[in-house]
Amino acid sequence: MEKTKKNTDNRFGRWLQKCKNHPFSGLAEALVWLSGIMTMAIMIYLVAFIVIHGVPHLKPSLFSLTYNSDNVSLMPALVNTLIITALSLVIAIPFGVFAAIYLVEYAKKGSRLVHLIRVTAETLSGIPSIIYGLFGLLFFSTALHWGLSLLSGCMTLVIMILPLIIRTSEEALLSVPDSYREASFGLGAGKLRTIFKIVLPSAVPGILSGVVLATGRIVGETAALLYTAGTVAKIPSLMGSGRTLAVHMYVLSSEGLHMDESYATAVVLLVLVLVLNGLSGLLAKGLTSRGNR
């Protein structure tokens, strides 16, 4: 105990000495620590608020397969969330990763096309989700006659998350040292084999970080899905209307009649995001260890 206290005092003394010798450096370090503490405090407060208000209202009727005005079940919304998340990622990940491979491995350095694609991806990343919802309503729901359906919502979300996956995958591929590629070429491997056997396994953690961010955006999306997937509380076919957990929570809270169930839905949504992030982390470790063999 005394040793720990002594180390803390020494560290604080060194920081004070740094502030005297380099005031701006000490101020910057203090701001970094303050920002980290504030971020952690806000996160802990939000999670605690959701858990305290939601856990007491979790009950078996919330997990009934059929929704009605008495049980306000979240199970149909949970199933729809999993369907939309899985389908959107299955479509968006191959397109995003292969687009990133082209930009990094095949496109000419400094090409105008590459610059245009990067600017377009960054611009699309900053567009509000309600604009994507309006586009999905006009194109998928109206022009293609898909109506309010899970498929319309999935395709709209694919367009939303594609720029994010492209940019994160591109940065992950760029972070792989060129020495890996040169060593593979030196051993006689071709371009395609080098990409799939050497470069991609090394870039998997970075790519999956983008997938995690995309998953979070899908699970938490409401505005775009209100315009494209609808708010029907049932488990439909791909061409039928259905609500996700985020939309379900929004509808309950906006009605003002089932606030307790809305908080309980928030707890389930929080647990779902944590589980998906955990599975992504395990998948990244598995793929990385497999690629290093």
Image: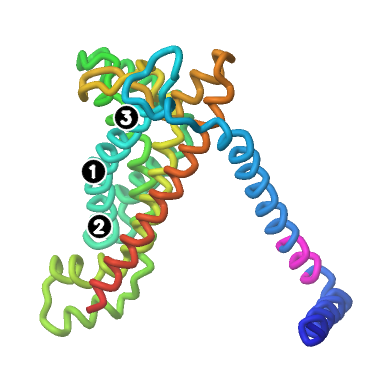
Q: Amino acid at mark 3?
A: Asn
* Residue 217 image label: none
Q: Earlier in the sequence, mark 3 or mark 1?
A: 3
Residue 28 x %, y %: 75, 65
Q: Secondary structure at mark 2?
A: helix
Q: Residue at x 85, y 74 (%)?
A: 19
Residue 87 x %, y %: 25, 37
Q: Is residue 94 left or right of residue 118?
A: left
Residue carrying label 1 = 90
* Residue 80 image label: 3
In the picture, the quarter occupied by the C terminus is bottom left
Range of the magenta residues?
25-32
Q: Is residue 203 left or right of residue 37?
A: left
Q: Nearer the viewer, residue 239 or 102?
A: 239
Q: Residue at x 37, y 32 (%)?
A: 78
Residue that protrudes farthest toward the right in the picture = 20
| Residue 262 visible to an observer of this rendering | yes
